[in-house]
């Protein structure tokens, strides 16, 4: 039996024939004629290269091959219907949505939405992967994820590909993290005072290092970057233990051993975005998740 090019509409007729038992009943069920039903079953038999029905008096019954194909057809038609509903832009959102994003955006923008969807739209399941921006955008380009949560800085802007849409989410001012006893009590950090210090940059995103180098160049020096750390908690630990200085969010609420000093203009502003492939938000679960993430900010 060759089922490589089976017409789904004809397969449905065969499934109905196995259920109803006569071509006349199938014709009445589908609103067509008995002749059309007979022609479609015959065409399906030619497609698969096997006899699907055999005469029994003035009626027909399915052959063993017809019964096997009808049995498989039930699952095939169910899968086709599930796919149709999954792709229907007006259907109730349901399905798996894969998200790649940086930790702060996952905590701030995604997790509250996922908790809420568990109540309002339990058919939507979100798979969460932690990645830095360039990594997340690469996964999005390869269709390995459906949504990317990324960031850039005012001093190191991202260049988004033409085939994506980036929705701004929120912004955070960053400052200079130093040991608690250092720096002025008021005003902005004097970066020139740290020309001989070790600096800490991100291990997985060069944008953070670009910002450090730009800020240092504005006051006339090139920073000595000796540590590359992804975790902000570990950055704080290194600063507290005297291993260097580095950028931290102004709103950072760490331990008492570190201060975050404001930066002079132009400062360092982190900007978060939700990014999807252009045209993909026709898919209801992705559209819903993007809308909720954008509302959460």
Image: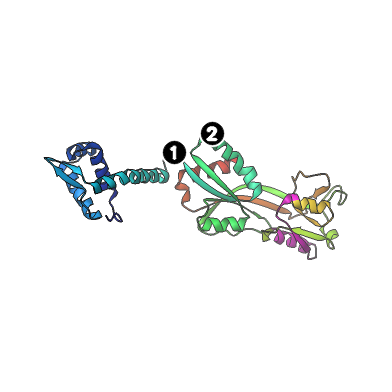
Say left or right for 80 vs 249: left
Query: Tag on residue 139?
Result: none
Residue that extends furthest to the front in the rendered view of this protein: 64
Question: Disc 2 on helix, strand or loop?
Answer: helix
Quadrant location of the C terminus in the rendered image: top right
Q: Secondary structure at mark 1?
A: loop
**Type of colouring:** rainbow
Q: Point out the tag, 2 or 1, that comes first from the N-terminus.
A: 1
**Numbered-mark total:** 2
Percent position of residue 33, x then y: 17, 41
Q: Nearer the viewer, residue 25 or 287?
A: 25
The residue shown at (27%, 42%) is 15
Position of residue 293 measured from the top left corner of the image (x, y, whole percent) = 57, 43
Q: In this orientation, which residue lies closer to the viewer: 126 or 175?
A: 126
Between disc 2 and disc 1, the foreground one is 2
Is the residue 228 above or below the residue 237 in the image? below
- Where's residue 177, x and y in %? 79, 52
- Residue sitting at the far left: 58
Image quadrant in which you'd find residue 18 = top left
Is residue 70 something that shows in the picture? yes
Q: Label 2: how many residues lie within 10 Å, few (<14), some (14-19) or many (20+)?
A: few
**Left or right position of 115 against 4:** right
The residue indicated by pointer 1 is 92
Q: Which residues are magenta?
A: 208-233
Q: Residue at x 70, y 52 (%)?
A: 269
Q: Which residue is mark 2?
A: 119
Q: Is residue 194 above or below residue 286?
A: below
Calculate the distance from the C-alpha at mark 2 to the C-alpha at mark 1. 14 Å
Q: Residues within 10 Å of mark 1 (few under 14, many from 20)?
A: some
Q: Point out residue 11 in the picture as x, y percentages from the top left corner.
A: 27, 47
């Amino acid at each position: 039996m060759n089922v490589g090019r089976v017409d789904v509409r004809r397969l449905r007729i065969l499934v109905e024939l196995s259920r109803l038992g006569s071509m006349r009943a199938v014709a009445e069920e589908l609103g067509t004629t008995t002749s059309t039903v007979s022609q479609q079953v015959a065409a399906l038999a030619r497609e698969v290269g096997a006899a699907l029905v055999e005469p029994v008096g003035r009626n027909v019954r399915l052959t063993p091959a017809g019964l096997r194909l009808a049995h498989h057809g039930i699952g095939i038609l169910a899968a086709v219907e599930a796919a149709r509903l999954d792709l229907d832009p007006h259907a109730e959102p349901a399905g798996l949505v894969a998200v790649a994003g940086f930790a702060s955006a996952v905590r701030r923008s995604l997790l509250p939405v996922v908790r809420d969807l568990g109540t309002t739209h339990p058919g939507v399941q979100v798979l969460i992967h932690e990645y830095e921006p360039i990594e997340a955008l690469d996964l999005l380009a390869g269709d390995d994820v459906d949504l990317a949560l990324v960031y850039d800085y005012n001093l190191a802007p991202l260049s988004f590909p033409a085939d994506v849409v980036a929705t701004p989410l929120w912004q955070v001012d960053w400052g200079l993290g130093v040991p608690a006893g250092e720096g002025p009590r008021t005003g902005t950090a004097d970066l020139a005072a740290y020309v001989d210090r070790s600096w800490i940059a991100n291990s997985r995103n060069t944008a953070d290092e670009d910002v450090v180098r730009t800020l240092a160049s504005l006051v006339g020096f090139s920073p000595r970057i000796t540590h590359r750390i992804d975790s902000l908690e570990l950055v704080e630990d290194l600063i507290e233990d005297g291993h260097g200085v580095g950028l931290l969010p102004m709103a950072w609420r760490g331990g008492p051993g570190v201060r975050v000093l404001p930066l002079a203009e132009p400062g360092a502003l982190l900007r978060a975005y939700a990014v999807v492939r252009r045209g993909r938000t026709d898919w209801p679960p992705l559209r819903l998740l993007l809308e909720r993430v954008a509302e959460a900010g």
